[in-house]
Amino acid sequence: MKRILVVIGCLLVFGCASPPPQASLTLFFSPEQISLTSEQQRKISKFLADNPYHQLIAKVAPADLANPFDALMQGQKRIHAVSKLAESQSIPLHLEYAPSQNADTLVLQRQSP
């Protein structure tokens, strides 16, 4: 009986001590990059797997390019790459264009309830 209580106590302690799922993920791109690297795909897949039942927001900033139209197009291509990965896992994403965010970044985060 004593062993069972010790095992249950250990499970509670280790279960409570495990880190909570990551609430956001920030990815950085080079200005000309439009597709995802394998490392970025791995990080996004892990984030999506850790947050499958949350409404997720993808905020993308424009690229650091001189031409604003080209910068916008780079951002749209990056959003498309991320949304395609989310669709393959059947996880809905709310996409937002964030022009005030740091250039060449994409932030995935859980939407607050």
Image (cartoon, rainbow, N blue to C red):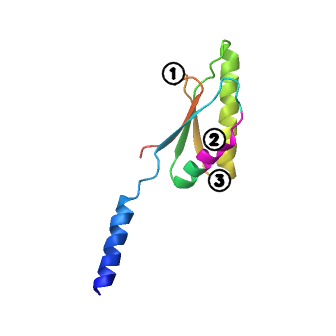
Is disc 3 in contact with disc 1, using a CB cutoff of under 8 Å?
no
Amino acid identity at mark 3: Ser
User: Of label 1 and label 2, which has the lower sequence position?
Assistant: 2
| Distance Cα–Cα, label 3 vs label 2 | 18 Å
Amino acid identity at mark 1: Ser
Q: Which residue is identified by label 3?
A: 90
Amino acid identity at mark 2: Gln
Magenta-drawn stretch, dominant element (helix, strand or loop): helix
Q: Is residue 41 magenta?
A: yes
Q: Which residue is identified by label 1?
A: 100
Does residue 12 sit above or below 20 in this rendering?
A: below
Does residue 34 sit above or below 19 in this rendering?
A: above
| Picture coordinates of residue 7, whole percent (x, y) | 35, 77
- The stretch of residues the image draws in magenta is 35-45
Q: Which residue is the extreme one toward the bottom? A: 1
Is disc 1 in contact with disc 2, using a CB cutoff of under 8 Å?
no
Does residue 11 sit above or below 61 in this rendering?
A: below
Query: Residue at coordinates 49% horizontally, 42% vertically from top-left?
Result: 24
Query: Residue at coordinates 63% horizontally, 47% vertically from top-left?
Result: 42
| Picture coordinates of residue 2, whole percent (x, y) | 28, 84
Q: Is residue 36 left or right of residue 94?
A: right
| Distance Cα–Cα, label 3 vs label 1 | 29 Å
| Picture coordinates of residue 75, whole percent (x, y) | 65, 27
| Distance Cα–Cα, label 1 vs label 2 | 22 Å
Q: Is residue 64 left or right of residue 11?
A: right
Q: Which residue is identified by label 2?
A: 40
Question: Which is closer to the viewer, label 1 or label 2?
Answer: 2
Question: Which is closer to the viewer, label 3 or label 2?
Answer: 2
Tell me the crowding category of disc 1: few under 14, some 14 to 19, or many 20 or more residues within 10 angstroms, Cα based: few
Q: Is residue 49 magenta?
A: no
Does residue 89 sit above or below 101 in this rendering?
A: below
User: Of label 3 and label 2, which has the lower sequence position?
Assistant: 2
